[in-house]
Amino acid sequence: MAPVLVSLSLFLVLVARESTPGPRNAHGAAYDLRDSSLVLFGGAGTDRVLGDTWRWRFGAWHRLPASGPEPRTFPAMAYDAARGEVVLFGGNRVLFGDSTHPPAMLGDTWTLRGDRWARASGTGPSPRAEAAITYDPSRQRIVLFGGYDLSPDGRPRRLGDTWEWDGTRWSRAADIGPPPRSGAAMAWHPDRGVVLFGGSGGPLSDTWRWDGNGWTRLELAPTPGRFNTAMACDPATGRLVRYGGWDGKRRVWDAWELRAGGWIMLPLEGPPARNHAVLVSAPDRGSLLLYGGHDGDAVFEDMWELKDGGWTAITKAPPAPRVLNGH
């Protein structure tokens, strides 16, 4: 009976994963206010890079049947509330890659309205991955900063340019501001506007504000640096919250909140340590939603909600081992 039970258990796991995005990291996500759904795209699973699109609404996942962007990791993705559509830019065709599967940067722009992706025409930022992105409702613009591309010799090169999307085209908004970096976190704050934190190269611990004309570094109390941390505005408190990331030595599980004097660590227990996760604001739920990520050895497929001052696991599942195949 034991082999039969094992086979049945494996079958049930596979069936369950067919109805959910499954384990993944370095994916893109945005919250679609038009129909109150979390939209998730691409990223890397345990053994390959993905190009599927999912919506989470009313507690259930639904995979979109429509074709769209090709598989990629680290796309920049945000919801354009003025136009009622999700915007996706760029990414990398691999996750870590190797000599057989080298990095390949993408520079295409896509919009998702309803269940249909459309590729935008025109030029914009150069191909890149790990760019920071957010929507600025006060100016009805999507703001994109930095990321990394490849130098002529094939090595990663950090970028420090700022771009804005007006619903039709990209425009280069600034070349001066935060030092070049990738893997920074960026989100909109009702009092401070567009805020950027951390990123590669330390990792960094500086905090900056974009007002549409230029960048200003915020003078805040010192805080630990983070790379690939996830950040969003808590709709219940109006404060920025960031979670997890890489601190230069290990993945971390801590959550921080931006207040008047600086970043304050929150006394919370919740998701296990990870980076490459996504964190989005869900205004209709009055909460923040977190999905996926990895801890170096395994890829997560759990989903968590931060609400009323605490984390709740919406879905729990053990992390799946990552396959080292160069994807």
Image (cartoon, helix red, strand yellow):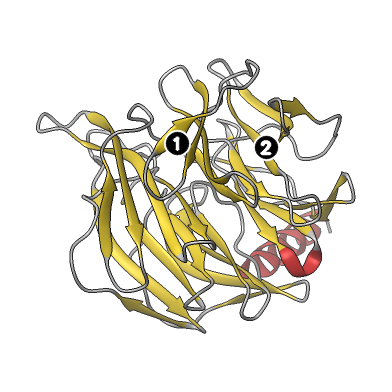
Q: Residue furthest front?
A: 213
Q: Is residue 102 left or right of residue 191?
A: left
In the depicted structure, whether residue 165 falls above or below residue 106: below
Residue 28: x and y in percent read 49, 56
Residue 18: x and y in percent read 62, 70
What residue is pinned by disc 2? Answer: 243
Residue at the (55%, 51%) spot, across then down: 24
The answer to which of 197 and 246 lies nearer the viewer is 197
Q: Inspect the image, locate mark 1, and give the three-letter code of the amino acid beneath it.
A: Gly
Q: Is residue 260 left or right of residue 165?
A: right
| Residue 96 seen in the figure | yes
Q: Inspect the image, locate mark 2, and give the three-letter code of the amino acid beneath it.
A: Tyr
Instruction: Describe the element under mark 2 as helix, strand or loop.
Output: strand
Number of dots carrying numbers: 2
In the depicted structure, whether residue 114 falls above or below residue 265: below
Q: Quadrant of residue 276?
A: top right
Which label is found at residue 160?
Answer: none
In the depicted structure, whether residue 19 falls above or below residue 161: below
